[in-house]
Image: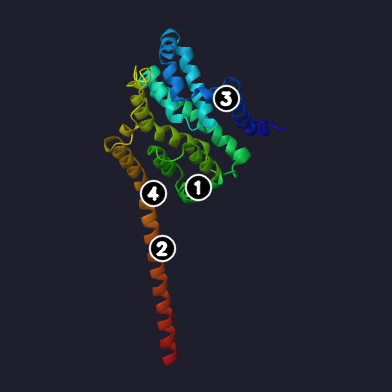
Amino acid sequence: MTLAHLKHLLPLALLIAGLVALWAFGLQRDLSWTSLSRHEAELLAIVAARPIEVGAAYVVVYAVTVACSLPEGALVTIAGGLMFGVVLGGALAITGASIGAVILFLAARYAFADIVPPRAAPFMARIRPGIERDGFLYLLALRLVPLFPFWLLNLVAAACGMRLLPFTLATVLGIIPGTFVYAWVGAGLAGVLEGGGMPDFAAIFSPHILLPLLALATLTLLPVGWRAFKGRNAGRRGAACGDARGGDARGGDAQGGNA
């Protein structure tokens, strides 16, 4: 087996290792609001005692969560804000999410790019042309608005043959605003979960949060729209010129016949 084959198998091996870790340590069972509220005080005490080790462990847990396409990404992000504060919690979440996305992207590219859940196929068919045509900008716009399945965008980008560097940059830049919003929600939960309360997700999707994200996504897509507009105009001009040349040629033939 060549070195290139080993490099291709490494992301898949990491993904399998993540799944084994989930099963062995019961992480999926512990990633719940009930567990977070039960262990809130304990988690805060551990972070205060060993911030570096806990921060590194948090990044690993987040990467495994994303790589294995678990639906608890928002929970882990909010937990990061609760444990580390808005800035550090958001930064750690972005790091873990980006690492997990890259692992899943590479594993999908080399192992199971064509495996798509049937219910996700229509959504994938809609966004695939945009990613194939305007990879970085289109993916960046989709990442900016936290309304699309994170794992599915990873699979679509891999299936479309998107290069790793644009995928990584679009992922890191695109998840920054939404991640810090979730971390901000988590930072305000100190004592709330322990008292039986729940985070207010309505704040995340309120107009003063969601509209700026939609505006950023729209600005990102402006170059895409401009290129499409120029392409259509160029096609129309080409067709018009072709019709004009055809008309001139027919006129010349008619004059020749009259002569």
Q: Is residue 259 visible?
A: no
Disc 4 packing (10 Å; few <14; some 14–19; many ≥20): some
Q: Earlier in the sequence, mark 4 or mark 1?
A: 1
| Amino acid type of the residue that numbered disc 3 sits on in the rendered structure | Leu
| Amino acid type of the residue that numbered disc 4 sits on in the rendered structure | Val
- Judging by the rendered image, the residue that carries numbered circle 4 is 224
| Amino acid type of the residue that numbered disc 1 sits on in the rendered structure | Met
The residue nearer to you, when weighing 135 against 177, is: 177
Distance between the Cα atoms at labels 3 and 2?
A: 53 Å
The residue nearer to you, when weighing 195 against 252, is: 195
Residue at horizontal 66 percent and vertical 33 percent from the top? 4
Disc 3 packing (10 Å; few <14; some 14–19; many ≥20): some
Question: Which quadrant holds the C terminus?
Answer: bottom left
Q: Nearer the viewer, mark 2 or mark 4?
A: 4
Q: Nearer the viewer, mark 2 or mark 1?
A: 1
- Judging by the rendered image, the residue that carries numbered circle 2 is 235
Distance between the Cα atoms at labels 2 and 4?
A: 17 Å
Residue at horizontal 43 percent and vertical 22 percent from the top? 92
- Judging by the rendered image, the residue that carries numbered circle 3 is 22
- Judging by the rendered image, the residue that carries numbered circle 1 is 124
Image quadrant assignment for residue 88: top left
Residue 196 coordinates in the image, percent (x, y) = 37, 21
